[in-house]
Image (cartoon, rainbow, N blue to C red):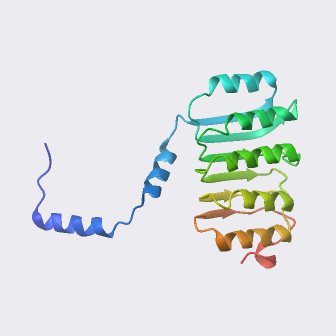
Amino acid sequence: IGSIIDLNDMQEILENINDINVTKDDINYDEEENEENNELFINGLIDEEKAKNLKNEYNKNIIKLLMSEIKLKNKTIFSNIINFFLNKDIKQFSLYDTNINENALFYSILDLFDNNFNIRKIVLHNCNLTDDHLSDLLRAISDKRIRYLNLSKNALTVVGATFISEFLLVNKTLQELNISYNDNVNFKAEGIK
C-alpha cells in the first residue's frame, strides 16, 4: 500500500518538515488560487436585463469577481450588481478600463470591500482613480489582509504617494503593489522609496 522508507531517510524528512513554516492562511490562500469554478467575468455593456441574468445565473459562491470595460446604460445598475455580491465571500476583485470617477460607482465598490473581510487581491487598473478615491480606498482596506494591490494607470499624484507611504507603514500583509503608469507623479522621486 505504501512505500518503504529507510530510517535515515525518515530522519531527514522529519528535519525538513520542521523547517517548513506554513500557516493556515498560506494554505487557504493557495486553495483560493486553485478555485476555477468560482470566478465571474463581466465585460462590456451592462443593461437591466444583463444585470438580472447575472443575479439569476450566479447564485453560487463567487470568490473572484473580474470586470472589464464596463459601460452602463444606467449608473445604478453597477451599484446593484456590486450590492448583489456584498454577502458573498469575494477574495479577488478586479476592475479594468472602467471610469469609476462617479462617486456612486466608487463607493459601491468600497461597500464590497467593507463587507468582505477575506478580500486578498484588488485590481483597479485604468479606472480614473484620484487621490481622494485612494485615501478612501486605503482607509476601507486598512483592516483587511490584502496581499496584492494594483492601482496602475490611474490619476494619482504626489498626494496619493503620501497616502500609499502611510498605508505601507501600518500594513503587514501586502506582498505586491503595482502603481505603474500613474503619469502625474514620479512615485520613486516624490514619496515612495
- Residue depicted at x 80% and y 47%: 107
In the rendered image, residue 120, in percent from the top left (x then y), is placed at 59, 53
State which quadrant residue 19 falls in: bottom left
Q: Quick check: 15 left or right of 143?
A: left
Q: Which image quadrant: the C terminus?
A: bottom right
In the rendered image, residue 113, in percent from the top left (x then y), is placed at 69, 49
10 shown above or below 121: below
Nearest the eye: 81 or 15: 81
56 shown above or below 185: above
99 shown above or below 26: above
In the rendered image, residue 5, in percent from the top left (x then y), is placed at 13, 57
- Residue depicted at x 73% and y 46%: 111
- Residue depicted at x 81% and y 50%: 127
In the rendered image, residue 152, in percent from the top left (x then y), is placed at 75, 58
Q: Quick check: 60 left or right of 45?
A: left
Nearest the eye: 9 or 74: 74
State which quadrant residue 188 falls in: bottom right
Q: Report whether residue 155 is seen.
A: no
Q: Which image quadrant: the N terminus?
A: top left
Number of marks in the rendered image:
0
